[in-house]
Image (cartoon, grey):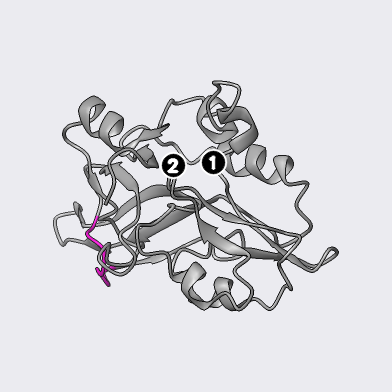
Amino acid sequence: MSENHYGFYFDASKCNGCKACHIICKSRFNGEQGVIPRRVYEYVGGQYQANHDGTITSSTFAYYTSVSCNHCNKPACTEVCPTGASRKRSSDGLVVVDQNECIGCGRCSRACPYDAPQLDPIRRVMVKCDGCLDLLQQGQQPLCVSGCPQRALDFGTVAELKRKYPMAEFANVAPLPDKDTTKPNLLIKPNKLSRPSGSAVGKIENLSEV
């Protein structure tokens, strides 16, 4: 892992599920229906019980997780791309798709546990987060970061993010997969209700949106 490579930070304790990041990212890509480069998962679970004394015992919980491409250190998408269109840049660690070489086969989408690469049904090429590379080159932040009203997102090198957010851990909350699968460059400060990756006590409530 190079700590000089870019990654995202997500503060689950601040996110209120407004989905501004989801909308601004989709707008950037002018995404067709079903193309959602950044998704906000609503993860819920638990149960409640009415007691004989009229009180209620509850173990219910709900929280949000905003996810796009995590620019992984072991990106599954690049390993299966037959043309080399999907690649990880050695200079900054961003995982990008060269749409001039992409044939739209969808192998990268099927391999990625975060559902990051998605097929544009009109152009028949894969689209995914590139960290808003054009904005980075102008010294600006990705749109999802600057557009988050709760300031729950941040972006920078892994070293910078670890210094700014020493309590954050690499992607470690449900419904995300085990971080060791692809070693994502995503640091998360959990919500107090967050369950660990692999937990089966909850479910994604908004599957139709993500």
Q: Nearer the viewer, residue 47 or 155?
A: 155
Q: Give amino acid for label 1.
A: Gly
User: Which of 9 and 123 lies nearest the eye of the viewer?
Assistant: 123
Q: Which mark is residue 131?
A: 1
Percent position of residue 193, x then y = 24, 48
Specify few, some or many for label 2: CA neighbours under 10 Å numbering under 14, 14-19, or 20 or more: some
Determine whether label 2 and label 1 are within 8 Å by CB: yes
Magenta segment: 195-201
Residue 197 in magenta stretch: yes
Q: Which residue is mark 2?
A: 92
Q: CA distance from mark 2 to mark 1?
A: 10 Å
Residue 92 versus residue 206 in the image, above or below: above
- Which structural element holds mark 2? loop
In the image: residue 7, left or right of residue 50: right
Q: Is 88 part of what is drawn in magenta?
A: no
Q: Quadrant of residue 160?
A: top left
Residue 141 position (above or below residue 76): above
- Amino acid type indicated by mark 2: Asp
Task: Point out residue 30 in the picture as x, y percentages from the top left corner.
Answer: 78, 46
Residue drawn at x 64%, y 33% as measured from the top left: 134
Q: Is residue 176 above or below residue 92?
A: below
Q: Which quadrant is home to the C terminus?
A: bottom right
**Residue furthest out toward the front:** 91
Q: Main secondary structure of the magenta part?
A: loop
